[in-house]
Amino acid sequence: MKPVIKAIQIIYSVYAFCVFVILMLLAFPVIAVASTFKIKGGNFIYNICKAWAKLWYIFIFVKHKEVYEVKHNKQQQYIFVANHISYMDIPTMVLSIHQPFRALGKYEMIKVPIFGWIYKTAVILVDRKNAETRARSVRALKAAIARNISIFIFPEGTFNETENVLKPFYDGAFRIAIETQTPIKPLLFPDTIKRLHYKSIFSLLPGTCRVIYLEEVSVKGYTMSNLPELKQKVFAIMEEGLKRYL
């Protein structure tokens, strides 16, 4: 029976990938036009990506579900942070943020044909191995905040392939939060690894993808000397939350 189930899963994964590509090709010309505009164009690109993600989820039988542990203020500007463990984190992220935002994205993704170009227009790229691009990405993130646009960062940097619920966090999100005095909004993606494991693109499964909205963390009055304390505080909140939902 297991070989039959695995064969069905592979067929489903190929089907989902084909639908993703078709929707991407339909979105591409619209995004290409929007990319010629600056701020409003960037906001519009995220709306297109959100529609793309919604349609893809419908066609592949994945349900996006939002769980609010506290009331979420969609008018407030935030630095959103979330755990990172699957490529399904990307559509989940896009569907989860209901205000203008810019995400920090890995430079390696731009190598993917067509999708890489769309990805480049939608995110602020960072190559963590290159100090110059890291500095440039920080300036771009701060510029977005200065324009009243929220930002989204995966503080683990890369997929968590450890046995722990979270990898150690990088400083970036918390440094920017303190320097700009922008509150941090932790989100949890507990189901994305169940929908698509990072080890194989043929591990895709239908089902529910929850996003958990946790209480915001104020940085009012924090200075750079409080950075380790802030990072540990957010880590503890997210770690405890993931243990409740996994």
Image (cartoon, grey):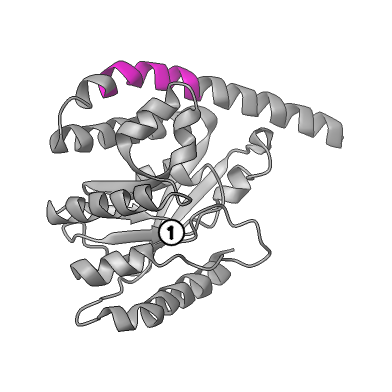
**179 vs 167, nearest the viewer:** 179
Residue 125 drawn at (x, y percent): 36, 43
Q: What residue sits right under mark 1 in the picture? A: 82
What residue is at 29 percent from the left and 49 percent from the top? 136
- Kindly report the secondary structure that dominates the magenta region of the rendered protein: helix
Q: Quadrant of the C terminus?
A: bottom right
Q: Quadrant of the N terminus?
A: top right
Q: Name the image quarter holding residue 178.
A: bottom left
What residue is at 68 percent from the left and 33 percent from the top? 202
Q: Is residue 190 above or below residue 179?
A: above
Q: Name the image quarter holding residue 107.
A: top left
What amino acid type should be assigned to the residue bearing mark 1?
Ala
| Left or right: residue 60 compared with residue 70 | right
**Span of residues in magenta:** 20-31
Q: How many marks?
A: 1
Residue 10 drawn at (x, y percent): 71, 28
Q: Is mark 1 on a helix, strand or loop?
A: strand
Q: In this view, does 156 lie above or below 35?
A: below
| Left or right: residue 192 compared with residue 173 | right
Residue 27 within the segment the image draws in magenta: yes
Residue 89 within the segment the image draws in magenta: no
